[in-house]
């Protein structure tokens, strides 16, 4: 998912709308905006892309507010329905509250049961509502104290943005699993999942929110406090591999530059003789350029993506995903015909995409297709807010690399090693160097509960 918030700007709702469009790649299932004018809270949520979910004629109603938060969703807990769209909105006796969340709460199941036994009635089936109930039952005068109490109970991965009548709160989990940045536009402060949202609205990036930090943004400006001592820093490496936009900077690293370095490392680990290097648009282009540069081979556009079709991965079912791949990509015959092709992709999750592309390239006349993947094999599920599927769906959890090569029909197949991946960030030696690499290694930085599934609360 993607979150955004801005406080103290006359065009808060419009800025939020445009920021959500910039964060659209982080979720396409639903979108929503909540805004406050000091007395009332207005909100609108809908299904689909931002442009469908938030029709233009809803903006005038929202634009009375001076502060606004927004959310784009792709589901990691709970079905893709309007009931689970965010921001979640509550009217308490002591005021209004809107809540937007990117990530996954790893103890949501236990907390859900605990709260239900004490009379809480859940409206949605997402893990985020747990946080709202914890805030509601904390019962302190000050909302800040309630939020702190709730944060002391939830575990897992999160970037939260909470809007009340007179304040905006932004929190990043103690391990820094999910990203969040702080920015400024005019005199107003804003927060976002990725810095690309700031570039879009003309805001200036100040810094990343720190793991375990709570920002309190109000008429007095921004105050930095802590709600937890920082845990073991565990930045999600998959943000760099696939999820984030290449123009974003996360924790000081530009995503495109990191991907390019993945490509160079991949060449060092797996040099292949071939005529041309191509990438699978969009997320593999940077790595393909890096590989071609290191190999002194031409980088070419061998695959074209239909830009009117969303990310195949973020469709809820395998059936839809399989259909989407066909619609989405075409080979450029003149580029690949009669050539030995190196095809770079950012990751193999289920193995559907690569297999289809290999046969597409052969159909277009490629004489050899070598598949090189700019990340290690995904062998474990993510419990922290990226939908990398259950283990039985992960091809690398069930097949060896030679078996995967055979399955996708490639002439050769290599993956980047964890060490090579970490080298791209400037680290040497084994280990995760302050990153979460759990989906490649099974070393989970925050305790997980394997029985927890996406549809647990349904
Ligand atoms: Fe990111 Fe993988 Fe860790 Fe999930 S398990 S947070 S996808 S690195
Ligand atoms: Mg891809």
Image (cartoon, rainbow, N blue to C red):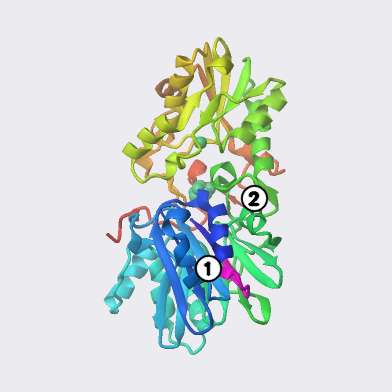
- Residue lying at 71% horizontally and 61% vertically, measured from the top left: 204
Kind of element beneath mark 1: strand
User: Is 207 on the left or on the right of 40, as rendered?
Assistant: right
- Residue lying at 54% horizontally and 12% vertically, measured from the top left: 337
Instruction: Report x, y in % for residue 415.
Output: 55, 30
Instruction: Report x, y in % for residue 237.
Output: 58, 47
> Which residue is disc 2 drawn over?
248
> Which residue is disc 1 drawn over?
69
- Residue lying at 59% horizontally and 67% vertically, measured from the top left: 212
**Does residue 172 appear anywhere in the picture?**
no
Image quarter in which the C terminus is found: bottom left
Instruction: Report x, y in % for residue 420.
Output: 64, 36
Q: Nearer the viewer, residue 233 or 258?
A: 258
Q: Is residue 130 magenta?
A: no
Q: Nearer the viewer, residue 346 or 38?
A: 38
Q: How many marks?
A: 2
Looking at the image, residue 81 lies above or below residue 58: above
Q: What segment carries the magenta color? A: 4-12
**Does residue 322 appear anywhere in the picture?**
yes
Task: Nearest to the eye among marks 2 and 1: give it.
Answer: 1
Q: Badge 2, how many Cα within 10 Å: few under 14, some, many 20+?
A: many
């Amino acid at each position: 998912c993607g979150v955004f918030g801005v406080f103290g700007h006359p065009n808060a709702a419009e800025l939020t709308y445009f920021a959500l469009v910039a964060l659209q790649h982080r979720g396409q299932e639903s979108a929503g905006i909540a805004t406050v004018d000091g007395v009332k809270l207005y909100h609108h949520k809908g299904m689909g892309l931002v442009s469908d979910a938030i029709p233009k004629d809803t903006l005038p109603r929202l634009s009375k507010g001076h502060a606004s938060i927004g959310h784009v969703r792709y589901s990691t807990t709970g079905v893709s329905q309007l009931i689970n769209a965010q921001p979640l909105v509550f009217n308490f006796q002591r005021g209004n509250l809107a809540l937007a969340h990117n990530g996954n709460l790893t103890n949501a199941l236990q907390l859900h049961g605990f709260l239900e036994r004490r009379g809480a009635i859940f409206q949605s089936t997402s893990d985020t509502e747990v946080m709202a109930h914890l805030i509601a039952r904390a019962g302190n005068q000050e909302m800040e104290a309630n939020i702190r109490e709730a944060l002391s109970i939830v575990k897992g991965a999160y970037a939260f943005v909470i809007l009340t009548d007179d304040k905006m709160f932004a929190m990043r989990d103690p391990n820094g699993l999910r990203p969040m940045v702080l920015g400024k536009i005019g005199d107003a402060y804003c927060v976002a999942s990725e810095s690309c949202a700031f570039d879009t609205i003309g805001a200036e990036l100040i810094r990343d929110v720190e793991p375990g930090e709570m920002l309190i943004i109000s008429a007095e400006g921004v105050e930095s406090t802590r709600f937890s001592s920082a845990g073991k820093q565990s930045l999600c490496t998959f943000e760099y591999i696939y999820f984030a936009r290449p123009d974003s900077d996360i924790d000081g690293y530009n995503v495109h530059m990191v991907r390019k370095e993945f490509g160079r490392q991949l060449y060092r680990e797996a040099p292949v003789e071939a005529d041309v290097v191509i990438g699978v648009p969009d997320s593999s282009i940077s790595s393909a350029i890096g590989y071609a540069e290191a190999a002194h081979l031409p980088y070419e556009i061998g695959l074209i993506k239909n830009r009117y079709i969303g990310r195949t991965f973020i469709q809820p079912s395998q059936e839809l995903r399989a259909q989407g791949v066909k619609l989405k990509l075409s080979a450029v015959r003149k580029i690949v015909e009669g050539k030995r092709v190196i095809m770079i992709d950012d990751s193999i999750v289920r193995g559907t995409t690569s297999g289809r592309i290999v046969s597409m390239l052969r159909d277009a006349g490629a004489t050899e297709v070598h598949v090189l993947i700019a990340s290690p094999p995904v062998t474990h599920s993510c419990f922290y807010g990226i939908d990398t599927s259950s283990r039985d769906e992960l091809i690398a959890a069930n097949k060896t690399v030679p078996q995967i090569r055979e399955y996708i029909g490639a002439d050769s197949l290599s993956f980047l090693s964890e060490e090579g991946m970490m080298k791209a960030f400037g680290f040497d030696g084994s280990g995760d160097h302050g990153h979460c690499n759990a989906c490649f290694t099974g070393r989970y930085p925050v305790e997980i509960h394997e029985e927890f599934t996406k549809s647990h609360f349904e």
